Image (cartoon, grey):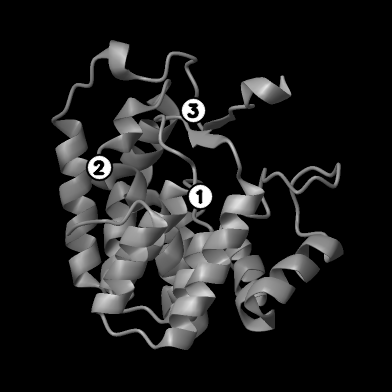
Amino acid sequence: MDVAQTNIQLYNQLRARGLPLDDLVLIRRAYELLTALYPGFYQADGKPFVAHPVGVASILAELGQPAEILAVALLHPVYDKADWGDGHDEGATPSRRGLVRDTVGERVEELVVRFGEVRLHPDTIEDDRRAIAELDETERRLVLVAVVDHLEKYVDLGALYFGDDSDLVRWTERVGDYMSEIAHELGEPRLGRMLSDAFAAAENEDVPAELRNSEGLQHYRLVVPRSRR
């Protein structure tokens, strides 16, 4: 599948799928808040950081997820190291939550917070997989976002262009099979196949070191405009 990396590509994808105007407006508002909170941020593979949440939303749209989940996908990282301009470290402070709530509504904001509680980790993923049967529909959708969050870094082999991909690759080696199993248990066999195919393709690639991020980054970086330095 083609995975959107820009807002325009995502809007066109959603329009082609026949999303109502109100849903499209929600997605636009979520995207504009995302760009306001991550100006000048780039992933460790060199892509603008906002391309990643857009890609996550794009994959979830292809899987038929509703607009509120696509908005969560766009905003899933905002309580991490975003540029809130409030002098605080990461976290969902009351003022931050208020801004998100004012932008996309109480329901989506609550789901963004809940997403932080279901993010997958290598040390707990086996327990997470076993617990899926006990989750309600909303929690299952949020786990789906967490799985796609990892997949998006692989659909274009972006994970292999990180300055130092060793942690991410080891992470995938530990959880890749579990993620495919989780996708199937969530009723998304297509996603399970996408995960297996993406991880297998990455194993067969050898990206030259000269094309990787020269700063050896594992996550992302902030580029300050020259006029502000």
What residue do we see at 16% from left, 28% from top? 205
Of badges 2 and 1, the one in the foreground is: 2
- Quarter residue 185 falls in: bottom left
Crowding at mark 3 (Cα within 10 Å: few <14, some 14-19, many 20+):
some
How far apart marks 2 and 1 lie (CA) works out to 22 Å
Query: x and y percent of residue 110 in the render?
Result: 67, 75
> Where's residue 146, x and y in %?
45, 60
Residue linked to disc 2:
156
Above or below — where is 108 with respect to 164? below
Q: What residue is pinned by disc 1?
A: 121
Of marks 1 and 3, the one in the foreground: 3
Labels in figure, total = 3
User: What is the quadrant of the N terminus in the image?
Assistant: bottom left
Q: Please report the residue visible at 25 percent of the width from the left and 37 percent of the height from the top.
A: 157
Tag 2: residue type?
A: Asp
**Which of 136 and 103 lies nearest the eye of the viewer?**
103
